[in-house]
Structures are given as structure tokens and as C-alpha cells.
Amino acid sequence: MVFPSDFESKTGFDSVRAILNELCIGPGKSRVQSMSFSDDLPTILAAQNQTEEMRRILISGKLFPSDGYYDMTGGLTRLRIEGTWPEPEELSALKLSLSALSEIIRFFRNQESGQYPWLTRLTGNLDVDPEIIRRIDRILDERSEIRDDASPALKKIRKERKSLQASIEQMIRKSMKLARQSGWTPEDADLTIRDGRLVIPVLSVHKRKMQGVVHDES
């Protein structure tokens, strides 16, 4: 059956499509855009049954695991380019999305007496490899930051950096002590931080007596 070109607007489905598009994320948006009317009875009945099962889930009070899913389309598409890699935030979102998908699959497959056969059928042979989630956990900590021991090379680099930072801080504190003893700093002055760096406050008349970079003057 061929539907008139203005059939969607006359039935008000264009408004429904717009609402669905706002509510969907990821590949769901493209699915909404490709939706079309059908006169095929099996297709219509399947869609009605799926909708009815989801309606029953929502009014049943059951905790459907729909949270924690993110649109990973852009990030995953970019990874197809050789030499690119995901940012920590993207890895964290991927982990949460895979966990959410795994929970959704488990929700339907664990229902007693096949309560939601039509939606369960949509899961098909889908499965989430738990090793992917475990590997992300070995890379990122609970703050979505890369762990020091994410790799042996990174562990070595960060250990050396911490040692160097501690050495530099010790040198700066010695310089601060010398400046205070020499009367080059204002009274009660202490080390401060500017742009993430430790800075020694020095009276302008003595600024040339210490080696270093002048970050600011007042």
C-alpha cells in the first residue's frame, strides 16, 4: 500500500516522531527517522506486542535498567581511524553503556514464565563480553582517571614524575626559606600557587636577587 505524502502530518505522527527523536539517544535516533507506516499485519502485531510489554514493565514498578546508557556513536566511529584512541571520559561512558546493556539483556532473560517474550526476542543472541568492562576497570579508577598502574610503562613514568616533583618542591621550599631569612619576602608570606605552579612571593625591590621566572607583579 502506498501512503499519501502528507499522510504523516495529517495523522499527527510527525509530532510523535519529533517527541521520540528527543527521547532517543545513539542509534535510536536513526531508527526513529527511518520509521514508516505499514499495512503488514505481522509487523503491526509485533510492534503492538512490544509496546504493550514495555507499558506493563513501566507500570509494574519493576526497576528496568535503562539508566547509564550514553550515545557512543561519535566516539566509536572516530576510533575507526588508525592512530586514534578514546579519552578517559569516553572509556568511562563505554563501560557504563555496556554495563547497562548487559543489565537489560539479563532483565529479559531472567523473567519467569516468559513474561515479556516479544521484547526478550529482541535481545536475540546479544551478549556483552565482561572482559571489556574488566579491562576498562584496570585502566580507569572510580573518578574516571587513568590509573598509575594502567601499564608498566605508565607506572614507571608517573613514579619518576612524582619523584621529580617532590625534588623540585623541596628546592623551592629551600629557596623560600632563604628569601624569608634574607628579608626578600613580605612579612608572613608563604608559598602560593599560580597556574598550578608553586610561587615564591618576593618584594619587587628584591625580585632580581632570586633566580627564576617572574609570573606576576603588583
Image (tube, grey):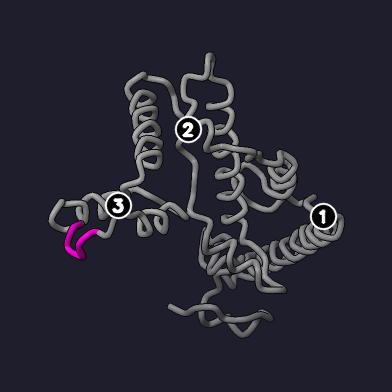
Type of amino acid at the residue the image marks with label 3: Phe
At mark 3, the secondary structure is: loop
Residue 46 to residue 208: above or below? above
Cα separation between marks 1 and 3:
53 Å
Left or right: 30 in relation to 191: left
Which label sits in the foreground, 2 or 3? Answer: 3
User: Percent x, y for residue 91?
Assistant: 62, 53
Of labels 1 and 2, earlier in sequence is 2
Give the residue drawn at x 53%, y 14%: 113
Give the residue drawn at x 61%, y 85%: 208
Residue 145 to residue 176: above or below? above
Residue that mark 2 sits on? 119
Cα separation between marks 2 and 3:
21 Å
Type of amino acid at the residue the image marks with label 2: Leu
Q: Main secondary structure of the magenta part?
A: loop
In the current view of this chain or complex, which residue is farthest to the front? 1
Residue that mark 3 sits on? 37
Of labels 2 and 3, earlier in sequence is 3
Which sits in the foreground, 22 or 94?
22
Query: Could you tell me if residue 22 is visible in this image?
Result: no
Q: The magenta stretch spans which residues?
A: 3-7
Which label sits in the foreground, 1 or 3? Answer: 3
Badge 2: few (under 14), some or many (20 or more) residues near its Cα, within 10 Å? many
Residue 64 to residue 137: above or below? above
How many numbered badges does the structure rendering display? 3
User: Percent x, y for residue 56?
Assistant: 35, 23
Give the residue drawn at x 71%, y 62%: 169
Cα separation between marks 1 and 2:
41 Å
